[in-house]
Image (cartoon, helix red, strand yellow):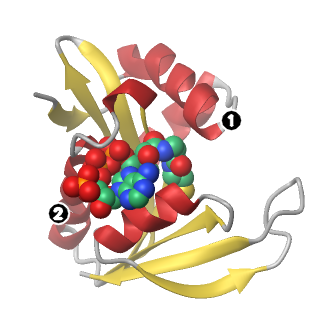
Amino acid sequence: MAIIRNFEEKDIGAIIEIARRSLNTDYDPRFYISIHEIWPSGFLVAEENGRIVGFIAGVMPHESEARVLMMGVKRHFRRRGIGRALMNAFINNCALRGAKRAYLEVRVSNTAAIEFYRALGFSAGARYPSYYDDGEDALIMWKSL
Ligand SMILES: CC(C)(COP(=O)(O)OP(=O)(O)OC[C@H]1O[C@@H](n2cnc3c(N)ncnc32)[C@H](O)[C@@H]1OP(=O)(O)O)[C@@H](O)C(=O)NCCC(=O)NCCS
């Protein structure tokens, strides 16, 4: 059973590995430190038997609005409710801080993530053409809190 807790600096190596494998991104450790500094309660990890198996990181760009920047769960730990637990904990922290809605961008080809966000009550909004570096469009998804 995974527990959800706040990110700590010692988790960076595991987060970089999950981001690399699940999201195909390779950010410098300083990127994770900086988003953690912006809002510590918006950066959560799922830990199972002492190992980091997933994470979510977001910010509140406006006092009533939260934005999910990244989330990922290790492949072998998917479809066990860990993503849902991470998102629920994140949304709870957003609501405690006064957010009225949460939003995120997702690649239009990422049907698994789109289905996941729909299952958690997110609705599809606008489509941003060529949002990603490789030219792929992003779908904006949002949820009222
Ligand atoms: C998206 C992601 C975080 C979901 O994590 P997860 O731990 O597997 O999700 P959960 O087990 O909590 O799933 C909750 C519900 O979402 C839906 N869902 C999750 N994955 C799904 C999939 N691949 N296809 C269809 N529906 C899915 C289901 O309704 C699921 O409930 P169920 O298992 O009872 O049917 C995970 O697939 C992942 O890390 N993907 C790669 C990284 C990524 O795409 N991140 C998002 C970028 S914007």
Quadrant of the rendered structure where residue 22 is?
top right
Image quadrant occupied by the N terminus: top left
Determine the CA span between mark 2 and mark 1: 28 Å
Instruction: Examine the rendering and report whether any part of residue 87 can be seen.
Output: no
Residue 103 horizontal/vertical position (percent):
46, 74
Q: Secondary structure at mark 1?
A: loop
Which numbered disc flags the more N-terminal residue, 2 or 1? 1
Q: Residue at x 68, y 35 (%)?
A: 24
Q: Residue at x 17, y 63 (%)?
A: 92
Mark 2 or 1, which is nearer the eye?
Answer: 1
> With 14 as the anchor, is 4 left or right in this view?
left
Could you classify mark 2 by the number of other residues whose Cα lies within 10 Å: few (under 14), some (14-19), or many (20 or more)?
some
94 vs 47: above or below: below
Q: Residue at x 21, y 46 (%)?
A: 81
Instruction: Examine the rendering and report whether any part of residue 135 can be seen.
Output: yes
Image quadrant occupied by the C terminus: bottom left
Q: Nearer the viewer, residue 99 or 54?
A: 54
Q: What label does residue 48 carry, if any?
A: none
Q: Nearer the viewer, residue 118 or 40?
A: 118
Could you classify mark 1 by the number of other residues whose Cα lies within 10 Å: few (under 14), some (14-19), or many (20 or more)?
few
Residue 32 horizontal/vertical position (percent):
53, 34
Q: What label does residue 92 carry, if any?
A: 2
39 vs 28: above or below: below
Q: What label does residue 24 carry, if any?
A: 1
